[in-house]
């Protein structure tokens, strides 16, 4: 979709008749998808100009493999498109307002980091505080008995690990053109499918709004002929990671088994979980980090996209490899709808074995 095409589409969608028609025929989700996609596509070039004007650019160096300074603020276009699409098209309950507000707060602190650079410890502290507020409003995992103190505390602890961990995992994996936005789109689509399976329209609309916002941004970030003209920045990567991770906790994943409810989101987010786990274990084993503070501050080229790039010798191949890996595991999550608990366990084990195979190939490629 060209920029003028996006403007035209958005103009049509803003007409009251258009919105009412989509709702009447029962495809509100399609309206949200098109609205968020077109608004994101309209806003992204504007954000690029603003980033250049304010000199909010990503400079090559460290774990970054791009060769020239590139404007940031692509994530701001996604944030605005996502929230606008939802505010125009759905009724928000208290929990959803808290979730979306939390995402905005996390994005704003990351926006400050994109512009002036702030300490990673401050960003982590803010993320944890936002998650604790969400827990207070009832957005919390239900893995352990809630009627016991130990069960409640474990649920809170795992909620913090899940949301904060995946938020930063999405940020870490944003190291190649189109990678983070593409993964976020795939994850959002699978969450939307599960929402349809389990008859959760609100969860589905939020997921579709995220997918559309990322799709509108992707053409500017995943150029087939030229390098990306704009990046998500920490603003975008932390925002999409936070919202998707929190949405996974708020939603109901299965009615018949707690194991299946646990397995489905783990499979959908597996690539992020795997990458975060791999780099943590490798850095500790090799002595690269010895304390939590060193882990937070460490900058390296040992993420899955770096390793696949070393193996395949082509950035685009590495990105699409990760896309297909993410989609493959997402399909496994969809298959869990009517599965037995043992099937959920086996599919998680299968995901683990798949990533071991990938790790062996990566390691062999690096050694060669």
Image: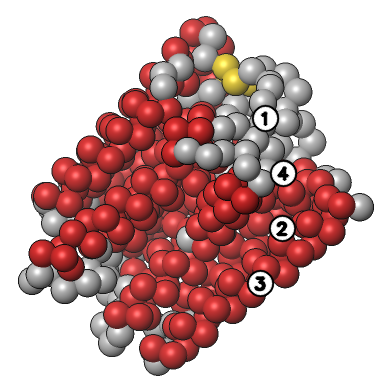
Q: Position of residue 279 (x, y in %)?
A: 60, 49
SS assignment at label 3:
helix
Q: Disc 4 and disc 2: Cα gap in Å? A: 12 Å
Residue at x-position 76% and y-position 23%:
67
| For the residues bearing labels 3 and 1, Cβ distance under 8 angstroms | no
Question: In the image, 189: left or right of 366?
Answer: left
Q: Residues within 10 Å of mark 4 (few under 14, many from 20)?
A: many
Q: In the figure, is residue 266 to the left or right of 136?
A: right
Question: Please, what secondary structure does the residue beneath circle 1 have?
Answer: loop
Is residue 221 visible to the viewer in this orientation of the structure?
yes
Residue at image mark 2: 321
Real-space CA distance between mark 1 and mark 2, rounded to the nearest whole angstrom: 19 Å
Number of marks present in the image shown: 4
Q: Is residue 234 above or below residue 176?
A: above
Q: Specify which label sits upstream in the sequence, 4 or 2.
A: 4
Q: Which residue is mark 3?
A: 354
Disc 1 target residue = 64
On screen, residue 149 versus residue 364, left or right, reads: left
Query: Viewer-proximal residue, 63 or 367?
Result: 367
Find residue 238 and report its horizontal and vertical position in percent. Answer: 42, 38
Q: Which residue is mark 4?
A: 306
| Residue 36 in view in this figure | no
Mark 2 or mark 3: name the one nearer the start of the chain: 2
Asked where in the image residue 146 lies, by quadrant, the reply is: bottom left
Q: How is the image coloured?
A: secondary structure
Report, in whole angstroms, how far the alpha carbon at label 4 lies from the one at label 3. 18 Å
Disc nearer the start of the sequence (4/1): 1
> From the viewer's perspective, is the residue at label 4 or at label 2 nearer?
4
Q: Quadrant of the N terminus?
A: top right
Marks 4 & 2, CB-CB < 8 Å contact: no
Frontmost residue, 192 versus 350:
350
Q: Earlier in the sequence, mark 4 or mark 3?
A: 4
């Amino acid at each position: 979709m060209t920029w003028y095409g996006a403007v035209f589409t958005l103009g049509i969608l803003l007409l009251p008749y258009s919105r009412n028609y989509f709702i009447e025929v029962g495809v509100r989700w399609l309206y949200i998808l098109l609205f968020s996609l077109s608004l994101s596509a309209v806003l992204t070039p504007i954000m690029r100009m603003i980033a250049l004007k304010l000199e909010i650019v990503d400079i090559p160096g460290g774990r970054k493999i791009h060769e020239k300074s590139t404007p940031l603020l692509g994530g701001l276009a996604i944030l605005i498109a996502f929230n606008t699409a939802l505010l125009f098209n759905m009724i928000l309950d208290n929990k959803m307002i808290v979730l979306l507000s939390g995402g905005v707060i996390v994005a704003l602190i990351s926006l400050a980091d994109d512009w002036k650079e702030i300490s990673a410890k401050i960003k982590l502290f803010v993320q944890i505080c936002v998650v604790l507020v969400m827990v207070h409003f009832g957005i919390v995992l239900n893995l352990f008995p809630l009627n016991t103190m130990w069960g409640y505390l474990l649920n809170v602890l795992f909620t913090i690990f899940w949301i904060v961990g995946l938020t930063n995992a999405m940020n870490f994996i944003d190291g190649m053109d189109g990678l983070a936005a593409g993964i976020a789109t795939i994850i959002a689509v699978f969450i939307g499918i599960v929402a349809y399976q389990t008859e959760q329209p609100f969860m589905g609309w939020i997921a579709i709004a995220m997918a559309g916002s990322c799709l509108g941004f992707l053409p500017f970030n995943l150029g087939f002929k030229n390098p990306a003209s704009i990046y998500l920045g920490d603003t975008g990567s932390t925002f999409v990671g936070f919202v998707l991770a929190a949405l996974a906790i708020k939603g109901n994943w299965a009615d018949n088994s707690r194991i299946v409810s646990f397995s489905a989101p783990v499979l959908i987010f597996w690539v992020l979980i795997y990458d975060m786990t791999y780099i943590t274990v490798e850095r500790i084993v090799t002595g690269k980090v010895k304390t939590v503070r060193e882990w937070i501050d460490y900058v390296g080229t040992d993420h899955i996209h770096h390793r696949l790039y070393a193996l395949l010798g082509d950035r685009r191949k590495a990105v699409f490899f990760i896309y297909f890996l993410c989609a493959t595991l997402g399909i496994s999550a969809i298959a869990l709808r009517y599965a037995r608990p043992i099937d959920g366990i086996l599919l998680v084990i299968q995901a683990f074995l798949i990533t071991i195979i990938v790790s062996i190939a990566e390691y062999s490629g690096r050694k060669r």
